[in-house]
Image: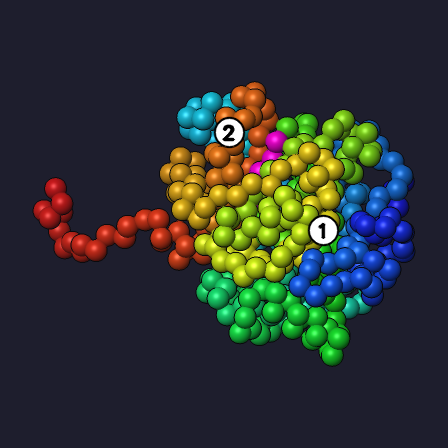
Amino acid sequence: MVTFNYICSECGQRFDIDPHRCVCPFCSERQADDQPLSGVLEVELQGTTSGKEVDVAELLPVESRFFPPIPVGNTPLWEPGILREELGFDALFIKDDGANPTSSFKDRASVLVSAFAKKNGIDTIVVASTGNAGSSMAGIGAAAGQKVVLFLPKTAPSAKLIQALQYGATVHRVDGNYDRAYDLSMAYLQAVGGMSRNTAYNPMTIEGKKTVSLELYRQLRQAPDVLFVGTGDGCIVAGVYKGFRDLKQLGVIEGIPQIFSVQSDTSDALHRAFKTGRFDNIPTQTVADSICVDVPRNGIHALSLLKKYNGRVITVPDEKILAAQARLSRSTGLFTEPASAAAFAGFLKVQKELPRDAVVVILATGNGLKDSAAAAKAITIPERVIRSLDEIV
C-alpha cells in the first residue's frame, strides 16, 4: 500500500496534498526577487509495493480514473547502432520523448497536472512557457476538456505557438522573456484563478516527470549508469532524480545514476551556481530555446540534488548543439530539437571520461519540427531549382 504527501525540499516539513498549496508556506517567506523558487514541494511516497515490478500508475498520487484519454509515456528507447560503433559505447541508448502526443517530454508533467485539476474540480489551467510546456498543456487540456491559458514570450518558435493555438488554448504573447511571462501568469492566477502548471511551482510537474525514470528501469531492467539531460529551469533534472529515488526507496534499485545536466554556455545559470553557489540574474540567449532561462525556477532544488547524488553540470556552445543535432539526425534518423541535442553534445564532450561499458542514456525531450528554424542554421538549403534530370545527371 502506497500513500502520498508533500514534503518541503528545503526544510523537510510535511503537508497534506492540497491543490491550493504549491510551495512551503515557511520557506517561501524568504523568497527573493530574481531568484529561484524557495520552498519547492515534492510528492513524498510512503509505504511499499509488490516486488521488483514497477507499476507506474501505483506510484503516482492521482488515481488513473482522473487522467485524460491521451497516451502519454511509454516512449521508445532507441539503440543507435551506428553511433555505438562510432563512439565505442555498446550500451548507449536514446530515450525518445519527442514521441509523446505533443512531441515533447513536457506531456509527462502536463498529464499529471491535468488529472490533479480534474480530481479537484478545477477546469482552468494557467502556464508560462518558452513553448513546449505551453503547447503540451494545451494539447493535454484539449483531451481533458479543460481551458488552458498560456503566457508565451514573443520570441517563442512559431511552431510551438501554432501548436498551442491549434489545440484551442488562450495565448497571451508577452513582450519579454520567460521570466516576464512567468510573472504575468502568476499575477493572472491571483486575479482570475485556476490551477498553475508552472514548472516546479506546481509539485505535480516534478512528480509527472519522474515517470521517465520508472520507464527506463522497466525498459533496461536496471537503472542506467549515466544519464544526460538538457537543462534550463532544472525541473526535468529533479523529476529524473525523483523517479530513481523512489525506486531506491522501494528497494527496486541499489543506487542513483550519475546525471549530467547540460546547458548552453550562453544560458548557464545552473552551471554558474554549481560553481559559485549564487544565482545571478544575467540575460541569456541560446539556439536551444527550451532551455533558455535567466533564473532557473527550480534552481535551488536541482542544485541540491546534483550535489547530493554526484551529478555534474556542464556547458556546450550553440554550434556544438547544432552539430550534435545534425549528427543525431544523420546517424540515427532521430530529428530532435536543440534542447535535446544539447544532451547529446554534452555526452560527446565528456565521453572520454566515461567507462566504455557504462549504460548511458541520452534524454531526447522534443521533436526537431518544434523549432525547424534552429535546425536550418546548420544546413544548406539548395537554391538551384531543376526542371529535368538532364540538369543533374
Task: Name which residue lies at 76% across and 45% down.
Answer: 57
Quick check: marks 2 and 1 in contact, CB under 8 Å?
no
Residue drawn at 81 percent across, 29 percent down: 251
**Residue 192 coordinates in the image, percent (x, y):** 73, 78
Magenta region: which residues? Answer: 226-230
Foreground mark, 2 or 1, reads: 1
Q: What number is the disc on residue 351?
A: 2
Q: Is residue 388 left or right of residue 193?
A: left
Closer to the chain start, of discs 2 and 1, is 1
Residue 249: in magenta span = no
Q: Quadrant of residue 134?
A: bottom right
Residue 162 visible: no
Q: Is disc 1 surrounded by few (<14), some (14 to 19) or many (20+) residues within 10 Å?
A: many
Task: Judge whether residue 89 can be spotted in this image.
Answer: yes
Mark linked to residue 300:
1
Residue placed at 12% from the left, 42% from the top? Answer: 393
Question: Seen in the image, is 172 located left or right of residue 218?
Answer: left
Q: Nearer the viewer, residue 109 or 34?
A: 34
Give how far across and how far down residue 135 sits, in percent.
57, 62
Looking at the image, is 322 positioned above or below residue 282?
A: above
Circle 2: residue type? Gln
**Mark 2 neighbour density, 10 Å: few (under 14) some (14–19) many (20 or more):** some
Provide the major secondary structure of the magenta segment: strand
